[in-house]
Image (cartoon, helix red, strand yellow):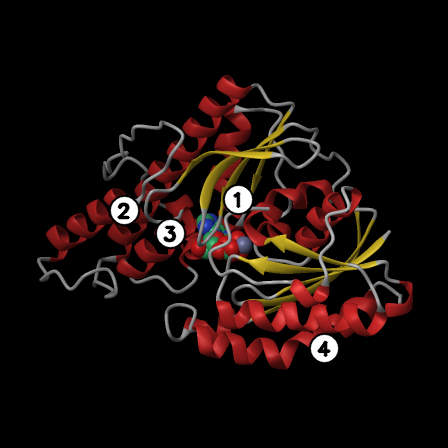
Amino acid sequence: MKILAVESSCDETAAAVIENGRKILSNVISSQIEIHAKYGGVIPEIAARSHIESIIPAVDHALREANTKLENIDAIATVKGPGLIGSLLIGSLTAQTIAKIKNLPLIGVNHVFAHPFANFLTTNPPKFPFLSLIVSGGHTQLMLFEKNLDYKILGSTQDDAAGEAFDKVAKLIGLSYPGGPAISKISSKGDKNAFKFPHAKLKNPLDFSFSGLKTAVLRQVLELTGEKNAGLKKSYNLKPKVATDIATSFEKNITDNLVQKTLLAKQKYKPKSIVVGGGVAANPQLRKKMAKAINEVHFVEPKLCTDNAAMIGALAYQMAKLDKFIDPNSLEIDSSLETL
Ligand code: KG4
Ligand code: ZN
């Protein structure tokens, strides 16, 4: 079964062709990072306009790279949420239109849930039921997936997502957007014990909270610079060595936290496999620490951790096996979708 998948929930326009949920025939990603970097974050209107320009070329490119044609595609998959509403619209309208014109079955996929399914696109796929730590720019949650795609959300962030914390702290200490890659680029040169930042104590130990950590970094920066509090939107002027030590201490704190909670969930739920997905899963420190704590943990290559359409095709295949198709006329996008 060949699935053509499209993804346009945030700032990447992507299309991929996936065979039998396991093999990537093509995986095209047109990133808008450079466009948004000068604003220090994603501007929704610019993202939507940029998707309009890129979506058809991306689909075309994905078909060509897969050496196939729409006539040989068995189903179309698109993201129905969560994400930026204008961005979601472009991908879903494209997929709905292709499905209608070519009379193809359509699958509407939850973008966040799709992240861990990128791990099926490897030679060593996870086994159900699997535990998944999803760490992206907008979401942080621990989930359990059963073979029939029944799922349980074991814990989720009460405030900022892990990627969001990376982005905000990076901005604070003068690094560029997106903050995660910027922090992980310099963190190997810093002292991880230079600054002690707190871990949040929560009623459900599998929930997450990073806003206290972010505020602690802000307080530390204000103390070091003697500047007035102008909030998290401003970059403060720090000596490069100090900024590097803050980045490294912050990264240690957040990655320790993510590993501890995943370990706790593993002990409690005893899954057959454990996978980590989402943009923050590209972080080398997190990968190293998690692999040390849980040696059987699954990670995909960084390109499949950040947003892509291949992961949408991978989850869509599992949904197709369960006949979870949707009428193209009744596909509804939902910017804060929380269900499959
Ligand atoms: O999954 P993703 O590509 O998009 C969303 O669905 O949000 O995740 C983007 C997030 C950004 O916050 C970015 O800073 C973070 O992933 N990220 C990283 C790294 N690469 C991307 N965070 C930490 N270390 C990285 N190497
Ligand atoms: Zn994502």
Q: Residue at x 59, y 24 (%)?
A: 295
Q: Residue at x 33, y 42 (%)?
A: 158
Q: Is residue 103 in sight in this rendering?
A: yes
Of circles 4 and 3, the one toward us is 4
Mark 3 in CB contact with mark 2 (< 8 angstroms): no
Identify the mark at residue 281; answer none if there is no mark: 1
Circle 3 Cα neighbour tier, 10 Å, few/some/many (<14 / 14–19 / ≥20)? many
Q: Which of the pair 143/263 is nearer the observer?
A: 143
Residue pointed to by mark 2? 211
Q: CA distance from mark 3 to mark 2?
A: 11 Å
Residue 61 in the figure: left or right of residue 251 = right
Of circles 1 and 4, the one toward us is 4
Residue 115 image offset from top left, x and y in percent: 59, 47
Numbered disc 4: secondary structure:
helix
Numbered disc 2: secondary structure:
helix
Residue pointed to by mark 4? 57
Queried on whether the Cβ of the residue with tag 3 lies below 8 angstroms from ligand 1, the answer reads yes
Disc with the residue nearer the chain's start (3 vs 2): 3
Instruction: Inspect the image, locate mark 3, and give the three-letter code of the amino acid beneath it.
Output: Phe
Of circles 3 and 2, the one toward us is 2
Instruction: Inspect the image, locate mark 4, and give the three-letter code of the amino acid beneath it.
Output: Pro
Circle 4 Cα neighbour tier, 10 Å, few/some/many (<14 / 14–19 / ≥20)? some
Residue pointed to by mark 3? 166
